[in-house]
Amino acid sequence: MAKIVIIDDEPNIVELVVTACKELGHETFPFVNSAKALEQLENIAPQLVISDIKMGKVDGFEILRRIKSSVDNCQVILMTGFGNEEIAEKAIGEGARYYIRKPFKIAEMQTRVKHTIEFTDTAKERDTLKKVVKRSTNPENIIGTSAKMDGVYHLIRKVADTDSTILIQGESGTGKELVARALHFNSSRQHQPFVAINCSALPENLLESELFGHKKGAFTGSVADKAGLFEEAERGTIFLDEVNSMALSLQTKLLRVLQERQLRRVGDNKTVPINVRVLAATNSSLLQLVKEGKFREDLYYRLAVIPIEMPSLRERTEDIPLLVQHFLKKTTAGGAPGVKIEPKAVEALQTYSWPGNVRELENAIERACALCDESVIRISDLPPQVIKMSGSGISDSSSAMPIGRKLDDFIHEQERRFIDETIKANAGNREKAAKMLGVSMATLYRKIEVKAAKPAKTAKAR
């Protein structure tokens, strides 16, 4: 039910509109004096005002202007018996939702009222959602109070509301996509699409089609025209994660899009203009890849207009207690009983190097919540690699350094043990293990295959 103010100096018109609105279940406030109606508008706080245009000292346009300046979330329908196209254009141009000529049918009025109230309700929901989304993606909600994270927050706030291309650099699992979302939802593009894609997830030909779209018949299976992600992100933001994995030929096409602000779908000879902000992320040094000839130097400088460096978790161990509490709340948010963690367990978490960064820590806390007794996480509930790093239960012999061995052999063995322990910690689930390690499934399988294929060394006869 909405509050509707009805204003007309003809009592019979007021009565007719009141009847139409009450039949729809709305609360009505009728006035035959426009000046008195204005005095009561802010007290009533209506969702809709239906007003005549030609009235005494205060006409419908004055009422419309007053409402737009002082009454929130209120729509206006203007009526007149002396209408022409010029007045209609003026009414809509100044912000009236509808313009109705007298005489009108009750059904026509009711249709206009229904549409206006629906529009108002939808606008309210949209505004509320926008506030929630913006609040949930504020830099403050990226967890951490360390000096390094303060530097990240400062950059986000400074460059979010620009159209500059930004390169977010950091190891896997450090929260690069969170930064990208914070940049988008704190910019003037926040109400437009945010489109993310992992460039390492698709082979080159499919990635090109996914990014730029294709024409029907461009390749086998392309049975219809398809817009790419750049077009889907129009007026919004596209986030290119793991851009370092992009093939050189595709880098050339991306560079052209960034330079010309237009693209060409696969198999098409026409160009499409685009208005998209580009954010990119890399877990490898692009400058090193440039030196190795694996990444275009000109594309690097196009992407890294403003670089943001995400610190690894081992560089900000002071943030671990805060992150742990955040993940504990998140894990038990579904109604499970609250879980606490012993101070010694937190200290153990701070001694570990976290190669998988924040993502690995989150997985470790989720695992510990599932394994702990009496809703208290102890050191014994932590992943094996964390326990070993903390020194708990490690004998002197097991920690002795194997002096005399080749460094490569030692590194391979440690990596093999680490991968095995991580897979065991995830009950044999290699997909979860890959996430915890911060590597792709392809990388994990490659390392497992290398490990399996590495021949055992035999002692040379002396």
Image (spheres, rainbow, N blue to C red):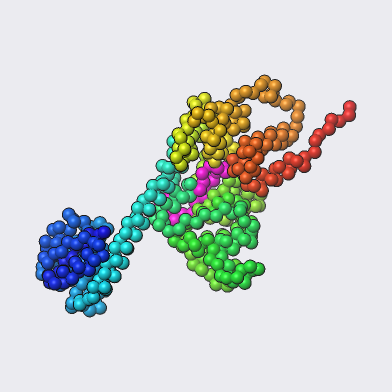
Write the start and end of the magenta stretch as one range: 160-177
Residue 326 sits inside the magenta stretch: no
Query: Which is more toward the observer, 71 or 164?
Result: 71
Q: Is residue 105 above or below residue 304?
A: below
User: In the rendering, at what x and y percent does residue 154 appear?
Assistant: 42, 43
**Residue at (13% x, 64% y) in the render:** 31
Evaluate whether residue 102 shows in this view: yes
Query: Which is more toward the observer, 362 or 219?
Result: 362
Q: Main secondary structure of the magenta part?
A: loop
**Residue at (49% x, 39% y) in the render:** 331
Q: Is residue 101 above or below residue 440?
A: below
Q: Is residue 337 left or right of residue 414?
A: left
Q: Is residue 357 left or right of residue 34?
A: right
Give the position of the C terminus as an image quadrant: top right
Residue 161 sits inside the magenta stretch: yes
Evaluate whether residue 144 shows in this view: no
**Residue at (57% x, 56% y) in the render:** 299
**Residue at (22% x, 68% y) in the render:** 20
Q: Is residue 35 above or below residue 411?
A: below
Give the position of the N terminus as an image quadrant: bottom left
Q: Is residue 268 left or right of residue 274?
A: right
